Image (cartoon, grey):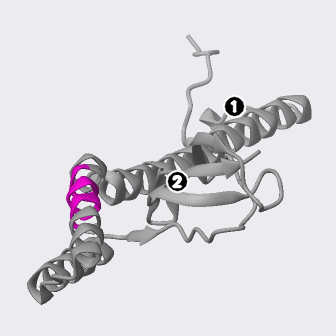
Amino acid sequence: MEDTTQQANGPEEQAVALEPTDIGQITKERDEYLDGWQRARAELVNYKRDESKRSDDLMKFANGALIRELIAVVDNFELAIAAMERQGAVEKGIYLIKAQLEDILKQYGLEKVIVEIGQAFDPSLHDAIASVSSELPSGTITEAVERGYYLHGKLLRPSRVKVSQ
């Protein structure tokens, strides 16, 4: 008896013939998967960059509470110096301590908000604690009561000022 079934003799005979529409579909799916992978990779790169920036900002501003408290020490030194100047007994040591403390704070990114008498009041930099009669134009600073500070360019504490009516 003769065997009528054909047996596969090699890989050529086992290959599945693909229709052109099948190749188009496979190519389309491949492109979709590639696009998805590329988007996911880009999102990961962006996420890593954003997390790095957040981490840097956290480190940069982590000492904010400490520096805010040290500012009070500087304020007290300024009050003591002002009182001593009125009495005529200025001690050089207090000036040196204040300068040293300010230098340390500056190393950690602290900068003073510059306030000048007659300067226009800016609510983004100043906190008005009183409105007073003055010869100066209305809405200008007549007295700086407490200095304001920036930490790495970001306002840490506004200057407390008196403003003309």
Residue closer to the observer: 78 or 60? 78
Indicate which disc residue 45 carries.
2
Q: Residue at x 65, y 36 (%)?
A: 15
Amino acid type at image mark 2: Val
Residue closer to the observer: 66 or 94? 94
The quadrant of the rendering that contains the C terminus is top right
- Asked if residue 12 is among those painted magenta in the image, a careful observer would answer no
Q: With 139 as the anchor, is 57 left or right in this view? A: left
- Badge 1 marks a residue whose secondary structure is loop
Classify 48 as above or below 116.
above
Q: Which x, y percent locates residue 67? A: 26, 56
Classify 58 as above or below 120.
above
The magenta segment? 69-77
Q: Residue at x 32, y 76 (%)?
A: 106
Q: Which x, y percent locates residue 49? A: 49, 56
- Badge 2 marks a residue whose secondary structure is helix
Spot the residue most to the bottom.
92
- Asked if residue 71 is among those painted magenta in the image, a careful observer would answer yes
Q: Which x, y percent locates residue 47? A: 50, 46
Q: With 27 as the anchor, is 103 left or right in this view? A: left
Q: Are discs 1 and 2 less than 8 Å apart at CB?
A: no
Amino acid type at image mark 1: Val
Mark 1, residue position = 16
The quadrant of the rendering that contains the N terminus is top right
Query: How dense is the environment of label 1, judged by Cα within 10 Å: few (below 14), some, or many (20 and up)?
Result: few
